[in-house]
Amino acid sequence: MPKEQGRKLIAQNRKARYDYHIEDVFEAGLVLVGTEVKSLRAGRATLGDGFAEIHEGEAFLHGVHIPEYTQGTWTNHEPRRVRKLLLNRHEIDKIDAKVKERGFTLVPVSMYFKDGRAKVEIALARGKKSWDKRHALAEREASREAEQAISRRLKGRTD
């Protein structure tokens, strides 16, 4: 069987970019059991409630839901179990120092297969206030209206 190449997206946490200011992004490997990998290959995972933490010098992913494999037997995995993240020591130390600062948290942004291996992108993020969210929404709306006006102008319409 040929080795997989490239990047295949499994799940994305779009709400993370809405709820948090993303400071830095890290790519981490995941320690998984067999039925979790099969379930991920079917494209099923939810990152919505997930977060990561550093505990005793190791990184762990909490709250990520990988549903049970439908054709699994009694060896099926727990859907919301804590999973270990594979990061380099200097990355763990850097993340731990930042998280100990007030206001930073670790949020999973996306999960994907990269060259056949399951990876998760975790972001060092700071929570947004409600007025930040409204401001970002207003900016996005204004830029969309400007692009629409330019495209109408280029097409020769003035409505």
Image (tube, helix red, strand yellow):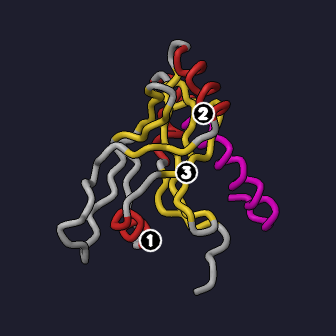
Position of residue 22 measured from the top left corner of the image (x, y, whole percent):
60, 33
Q: Residue at x 78, y 67 (%)?
A: 155
Distance between the Cα atoms at labels 2 and 1? Answer: 28 Å
Residue 48 lies left or right of residue 67; in this view the side is right
> Label 2: how many residues lie within 10 Å, few (<14), some (14-19) or many (20+)?
many
User: Please, what is the three-letter code of the amino acid marked with disc 1?
Assistant: Arg
Residue 54 appears at what percent x and percent y?
47, 28
Q: Residue at x 33, y 67 (%)?
A: 35
Occupied quadrant, residue 34: bottom left
Q: Residue at x 58, y 87 (%)?
A: 1
Residue 29: assigned label: 3
Q: Are marks 2 and 1 in contact (CB under 8 Å)?
A: no
Magenta residues (range):
136-159
Query: In the rendered structure, which disc, 3 or 1, sits on the residue that comes first in sequence?
Result: 3
For residue 159, which quarter of the picture?
A: bottom right
Number of other residues with Cα within 10 Å of mark 1, as a class: few under 14, some 14 to 19, many 20 or more: some
